[in-house]
Image (spheres, helix red, strand yellow):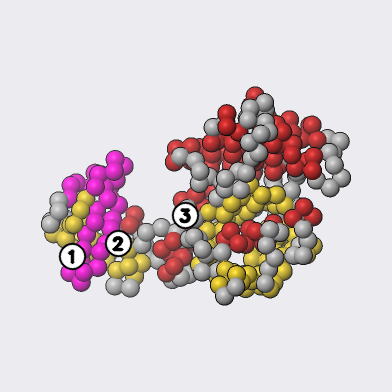
Amino acid sequence: MGNVLELRGLTKHFQEQVALDRLELTIPEGELFSLLGPSGCGKTTTLRLIAGFEEPTAGEVYLHGRRLDGLRPYERNVSTVFQNYALFPHLTARENIEFGLRHRAGGWPGDGARRVAAAMEMLQIADKGERKPAQLSGGEKQRVALARSLVLEPEVLLLDEPLSALDPNLRKQVRTELKALQRRVGITFLFITHDQEEALSLSDRIAVLNAGRLEQVGTPRELYLRPKTRFAAGFLGPVNWIQGVGVRPEATQVAHERPGAEVRSLAATVENAVFLGNCIHVETRLATGEAVVAEVSRFNGTFERGERVHVWWREGDELAL
């Protein structure tokens, strides 16, 4: 399969502010690809430039080799699921799903009814068609928004933090459903999020953005275990920076006795220990003043505030920046 989406030197200025700075990105067909970064990093601006809601200051957007920048949103074969779902409150769920098909160029397609029925069945909302958005739960609203986009049969589906309005438990459930849905339909998903756990669990590949610039692109495993910059390392999850070495908390151990010479160890003092059920979150401080956090097995014993311990990690567990 080839590349479906290509961004070449994509740049966007809002007056004096640089929102996106010469972004180069290629997304293969059929991937669930995430743009990850903090608020203001340029990820939503990127989505809006692809969708046609903004025009770039410089650079180009290509969809299957066809240049998109300069085209109106309805002339691009992409579809967007917005953060707040943007459902019409006066329309039923079915009418919301049909809306894009009824108002697209060329009018209602011959297989429109089949597409709508298939999307509602696939997203398990076939029995919710006559309800208004106010009568739907958060998860049901999201499914309606997804169905409305999927019936258009886009080449790329753009999702702008679509899980942020859901409660934590429902987010995890819908996250699993969303990944399964992408596998079934085979459409390229471009997923925008600031949540590293969401990106790691959903994505085939992730692009980390920082202040409008691309930090790194890779698989979740590559980014987590082999980050190229301190920013990428820290944004993908917590890191202990110990004497210039980065070690993840789950790779950091705490022991009452000094471990053997085959590992790297340092004396520390326990500042706090929290029992989390599956592990103990131990916060320590070295003599140098550096804070070191470890997530250790609950079978490793107990740790008390003020207790002298040793923090250690195995050679090779460091992040090689």
Crowding near pointer 3: few (<14 within 10 Å), some, many (20+)?
A: some
Mark 2 is on which residue type? Trp
Q: Residue at x 31, y 42 (%)?
A: 278
Q: Which type of secondary structure does the marked residue at label 2 adopt?
A: strand
Task: Calculate the distance from the C-alpha at mark 2 to the C-alpha at mark 3.
Answer: 24 Å
Mark 3 is on which residue type? Gln
Q: Quadrant of residue 146?
A: top right
Crowding near pointer 1: few (<14 within 10 Å), some, many (20+)?
A: some
Q: Which type of secondary structure does the marked residue at label 1 adopt?
A: strand
Task: Calculate the distance from the C-alpha at mark 3 to the C-alpha at mark 1.
Answer: 31 Å
Q: Residue at x 78, y 61 (%)?
A: 71
Mark 1 is on which residue type? Ala
> Which numbered mark, 2 or 1, is in the foreground of this view?
1
Task: Calculate the distance from the C-alpha at mark 2 to the C-alpha at mark 1.
Answer: 12 Å
Residue identifier under label 2 = 313
Residue identifier under label 3 = 196
N-term mark: 2 or 1: 1
Q: Which type of secondary structure does the marked residue at label 3 adopt?
A: helix
Crowding near pointer 2: few (<14 within 10 Å), some, many (20+)?
A: many
Q: Is residue 106 above or below residue 4?
A: above
Q: Which of the labelled discs sits on residue 267, or is there none?
A: 1
Q: Quadrant of residue 62?
A: bottom right
